[in-house]
Image (cartoon, rainbow, N blue to C red):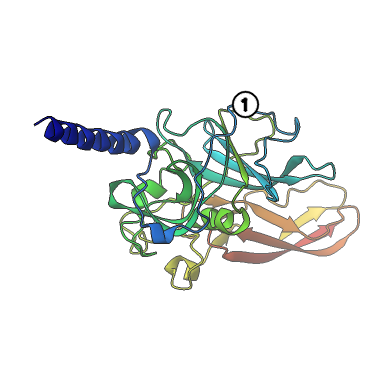
Amino acid sequence: MGKRVQKLLSIAIVIMGLVAGCTAGGETDVSESKEVVNGTVGVLLSTSDPLIGGGKPVEPEGNQGGYLIRVDRTANCVTIYEKDVNGTFTIPVKHMICSVGTGENTPVGVFAISDQYRWRALFGGTYGQYASRITGNILFHSVPYQRQSENTLVPGAYNELGTKASQGCVRLTCADAKWIYENCASGTVVEIFDGPAANLPEKPEALYLDPRSPYCGWDPTDPSGENPWKKMPIALYRVRDLTVKRGSGIDLLAGVFALDVDGQTLLKVQASGEVDVNRCGSYTVKYTAVGATGAVATAYATVTVVE
């Protein structure tokens, strides 16, 4: 009888440990062992929060990573840094919108990327693309999918990007998760902190996915050749020819705007071409906008300078 009680207690302890791991650590670590690539478990290195540009971060022994990843829990933004000529990570090269965990589910500290996975089983029977382990069962990965298929995205979760929404992992667009997966090898340092960060730029935006859209099961940034968003155009509006008097000022972007493939997300428009308002003549201005899918819209206008 004593042995039976002892056995039951052992089973109960194991079950309690599994439950604790699911509730306290974020997306459940349930994928098959054959998916493991780099074989080591992420380790908490430090709970310090070095200032950006304030010196080298803590790095694992033997780390040859070319990047530092900083996750701002307050802004829900990831910034990737590379080294300057002094070997310090001060040069921002990418900014990514993300969703960290609700509450304190995403831990603050300095960690190192370990295992990486093309697909990863997540909490609630969902899956993530391009997962990179930060520590324990906290990972970078795409917004969840219902199955291991690129056309089964959960659109509501995609629309939460930029807010705290996960069980602890750092959710990204497919393109951003893929970039980390392909460019940030095992040993790359990850700092998770609470902002504000003095040099954080305007936070990137993600497209809004209308759940009524026939394409809402696809991440617009997914590089797959089957992605229907890749075939959708973006549009420039209010590009028009202008006539101005010599010596007067001109705002080439006044009234000009562009919308991404969802028809409502505003894009940054760039105007290129020299216009000399002190010299009469005709000048060509090129307008360009680039969407989240990589689609490019281009338009031209003529600016005529007269007496």
Front in this rendered view, residue 263 or 207: 207
Toward which corner of the image does residue 7 lie, by quadrant? top left
Residue 180 seen in this snapshot: yes
Q: Residue furthest bottom?
A: 225
Residue 187, percent from left and from top = 61, 47
Q: Residue furthest front?
A: 2
Residue 171 seen in this snapshot: no
Q: In this image, 285 relative to 216: left or right?
A: right
Front in this rendered view, residue 22 or 167: 22
Q: Residue at x 41, y 49 (%)?
A: 158
Front in this rendered view, residue 178 or 184: 184
Q: In this image, 108 relative to 105: left or right?
A: right
Q: Residue furthest left?
A: 1
Pick the quarter of the image with the N terminus: top left
Image vertical order of residue 148 relative to residue 27, above or below: below
Q: Residue at x 72, y 52 (%)?
A: 252
Image vertical order of residue 144 relative to residue 4, above or below: below
Residue 57, percent from left and from top = 69, 35
Q: In this image, 3 relative to 86: left or right?
A: left
Front in this rendered view, residue 136 or 297: 136
Decide: few, some or many residues near mark 1? Use Cα within 10 Å; few <14, some 14-19, many ≥20: some
Three-letter amino acid code at disc 1?
Answer: Ser
Image vertical order of residue 212 relative to residue 4, above or below: below
Report which residue position mark 1 lands on. 48
**Label tally:** 1
Pick the quarter of the image with the C terminus: bottom right
- SS for callout 1: loop
Toward which corner of the image does residue 104 lie, by quadrant? top left
Image vertical order of residue 256 relative to residue 12, above or below: below
Residue 89, percent from left and from top = 73, 41
Q: Residue at x 67, y 47 (%)?
A: 63
Q: Residue at x 56, y 40 (%)?
A: 77
